[in-house]
Amino acid sequence: KDEERKEVYGDIVKLLQSGSVLLLFPEVSIAEEYHKMFSDAYGERVVLFHSELTTTEKINAWFNMMLGTNFIILGTRISIFCPAPDLRTIILDKGNDPSYREQRSPKYNASEIAELRCKSHDIPFIIGETALSVGARLDILDGKATYEAYNKENLPSVHTIFMNQKTTDKRISFFAWDTLSMFEETLLKDGKVAVLHNRKGSSKILKCEKCEHGVTCNTCNYGMVLSDDGKDLLCRFCKTAVPFNKKCPSCGSKKIGERVYGIEKIHKVLKEFYPDLGIIKFMGGMTDIAGNFNIAVGTSAIKKILKINKFSLLIIISGESFLNIPDYNSEEKFFIMTNEMRGLINNPDCKILIQTRSPNLEVYKALIENNSDIFYERELSIRKQLLYPPYSEMIKLEIKGVKKSAFERKKETLESFIKEKGYELFYSGPSFPPVKKGQGMWKYLLRFKESFDRKEIKRIAYETGATVESNPEQI
């Protein structure tokens, strides 16, 4: 819970009677919230540093830190570079948050830099997390890190709702009967409901009514849609078009059709069925909501409003929309996201419903029983067998280009380099999406089980204009 987190960070700062401490936060709004809290107690010792400050404010803060000592520095990922000659510790809040990774060149991971900085100064590196990453769990098991658990009581309960063609409500097709029953019961009791989905817009997904298989593109694995005349399957990302033979590619059933999902569609349908209720949309880029509401529909960005509104029910429309992604750490991300939302919800009586076709998955069992060991033991076992991180290091090299000839030359150069060095090529193929802003995208995933020459990787990346990322957030 946030209050416990603030108390712990406050106690750590209080223990450091001399020297500077650096606290990193995933969002400016959180850094500003802590800035007020610490300023009330420590006055001018507190320095706020983030990208939204004016140039003059940044320069003044930077020189103050360079010339002074004994500061409490608060900021977002950019503040990891702040000078602090007398640095005593670094605290990383919500260390699994993807916002700590800079996506523009030069790319960097503030979490990794914080760890390196602490090692070079021989000072503690403290990470505040609702749920540990798989890598952090392994470090604890190997004795490389210590772990202290705080109160896990009074958290919202998690439940799975089995969802298939037979259990789906005929009127509101994105709800199972049991979900709709709890949804309406909550509203009748004047409770607030949050509806979470992993797709924006009004995505049309082709699915088999018999086996629930979704029709995806063979090139980029994105869901395909029907052409206007119904004769072809189209991929809006890589522009692949193939004839539609009106059969499920998995089981051969002819019972295959379009299902329309997405935040826009869900919002529209709910407004049609419940015109007298306040229904809002909340997606990435939004920071606040206006007016009273009964139902909030949104992406994972909805977590920003969970702690400032008392929700009685949170519905995750489809567990598969988070888990059925071609990424080795999709279950980890879902586990961490769900636990983070449990910690943010300020109503212990709130229920979290996860609609799914596979309710017996270990990740769901771990959440329902509030037993993280179930998840970590299985995930670590699988990754060890398959040699996925943290048992190896993945390097992603990604190139882009408009002209086919230049694009092919870059590919040839990289492929020759990888072959010459004898690196293990884990994957070579189109990126996801394969076309971005009119440019073709291609990626190479290299897997290293032991140390390697990073300078060589940097050199070839510079020659080909490739971007490089270690253990990428998304492969």
Image (spheres, rainbow, N blue to C red):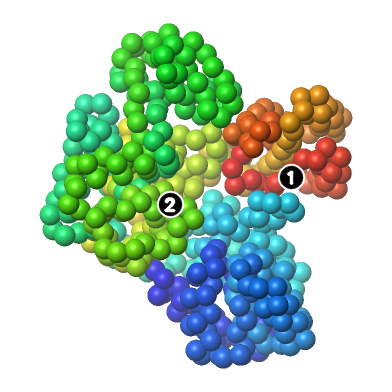
| Dot 2 amino acid type | Met
Element at label 1: strand
Return the residue at label 1. 468
| Dot 1 amino acid type | Val
Q: Residue at x 60, y 63 (%)?
A: 145
Element at label 2: loop
Q: Residue at x 66, y 61 (%)?
A: 110
Residue 392, x across and y down, in percent: 67, 43
Classify residue 292 as left or right of residue 412: left
Quadrant for residue 251, please give it.
top left
Residue 474, x across and y down, in percent: 59, 42
Q: Which mark is residue 364?
A: none
Residue 430, x across and y down, in percent: 65, 29
Q: Residue at x 65, y 85 (%)?
A: 71
Compare residues 124 and 349 and report the one nearer the observer: 349
Quadrant for residue 127, please give it.
bottom right
Residue 226, x across and y down, in percent: 43, 20
Compare residues 198 and 20 and report the one nearer the observer: 198
| Residue that protrudes farthest toward the top in the picture | 245
Asked whether the viewer can see residue 352, the reply is: no
Q: Residue at x 22, y 41 (%)?
A: 272
Residue 248 vertical placement versus 150 (above, below)? above
Residue 35 vertical placement versus 109 (above, below)? below
Q: Which mark is residue 283?
A: 2
